[in-house]
Image (cartoon, grey):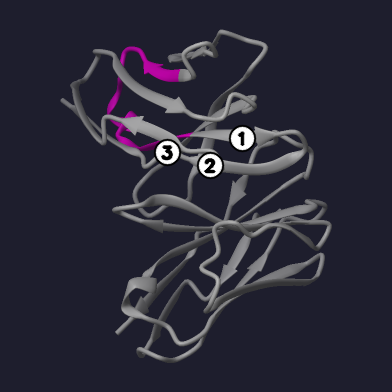
């Protein structure tokens, strides 16, 4: 089955700077790549996703890049704020009508004031 | 809409006991997923159902774990002969059931095996 690697596991950045999280996947058939944010004591929530027919997607301060050839995708948070501190999970879907989503191990992002 | 409801929120069992975890998906969602979350492993896929039928159980430990979805309004995850390494947060999620759609997670059941 699909395997998703996520790095770094811990990330600390200064408020106002950018944060980047990188993921790679193995199955070239994967065609959907969501990102989930989990705040302490809360459940994971979808924040942005990208499909394989796109290379870049932006929602406000969130930018996702997808390189299908290299089987890599990344999340970039620009102008980070304290509210961005959380766990972030990248994921990939198997496609072909299989809704199973495989998650990376997570990145704990801390925004330093 | 109350979202995905999981009960209980916390469960403490002794080693060797059975644990049953319950999940009520969002009404109208046809796909239900179970994940296990630990600090070390992150979010591990266990199994999922579509229209109550089991589709993929590739993440389920074969011997002691089982999941069912007897009707469209609830699913259960049963762990027999619980072991300390089963301690984790078990998350249920539902989606519309169309491929590549957003998962809505419950708040999870924190299982502690003493």
The one nearer the camera, A39 or B23, is B23
Q: Where, quadrant-wise, is the C terminus of chain A in this rendering?
A: top left
Residue span colored magenta = A73-90
Q: Badge 1 sits on which subunit? A: A
Percent from the top left, x then y, of residue A50?
59, 20
For marks 1 and 2, the one nearer the N-term is 1
Helix, strand or loop at label 2? It is: strand
Query: Around disc 3, counting alpha carbons within 10 Å, would you say few (fewer than 14), some (14 to 19), or many (20 or more)?
Result: many
User: Circle 3 is placed at which residue position?
Assistant: A104
Question: Which residue does the image show at 75% across and 36% down from the upper left?
Answer: B99
A28 is higher (above) or lower (below) than A95: above
For marks 1 and 3, the one nearer the N-term is 1
- The alpha-carbon separation of the residues under discs 2 and 3 comes to 7 Å
A10 is higher (above) or lower (below) than B61: above
Q: Is-magenta flag for residue A89?
A: yes
Percent from the top left, x then y, of residue A62?
45, 17
């Amino acid at each position: 089955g699909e395997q998703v690697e996520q790095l770094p596991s811990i990330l600390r950045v200064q408020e106002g700077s950018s944060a980047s999280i990188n993921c790679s996947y193995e199955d070239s058939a994967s065609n959907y790549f969501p990102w989930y944010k989990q705040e302490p004591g809360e459940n994971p929530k979808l924040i942005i996703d990208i499909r394989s027919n796109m290379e870049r997607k932006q929602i406000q301060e969130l930018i996702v890049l997808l390189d299908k050839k290299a089987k890599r995708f990344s999340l970039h948070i620009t102008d980070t704020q304290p509210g961005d501190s959380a766990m972030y999970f990248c994921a990939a879907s198997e496609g072909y009508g299989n809704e199973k989503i495989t998650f990376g191990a997570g990145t704990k992002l801390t925004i330093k004031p | 809409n109350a979202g995905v409801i999981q009960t209980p929120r916390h469960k403490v069992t002794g080693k060797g006991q059975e644990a049953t975890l319950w999940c009520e998906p969002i009404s109208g969602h046809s796909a239900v997923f179970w994940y296990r979350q630990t600090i070390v492993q992150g979010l591990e896929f266990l199994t999922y159902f579509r229209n109550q039928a089991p589709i993929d159980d590739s993440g389920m430990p074969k011997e002691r774990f089982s999941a069912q979805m007897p009707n469209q309004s609830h699913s259960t995850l049963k762990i027999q002969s619980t072991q300390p390494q089963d301690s984790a947060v078990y998350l249920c999620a539902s989606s519309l059931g169309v491929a590549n759609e957003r998962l809505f997670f419950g708040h999870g059941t924190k299982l502690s095996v003493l």
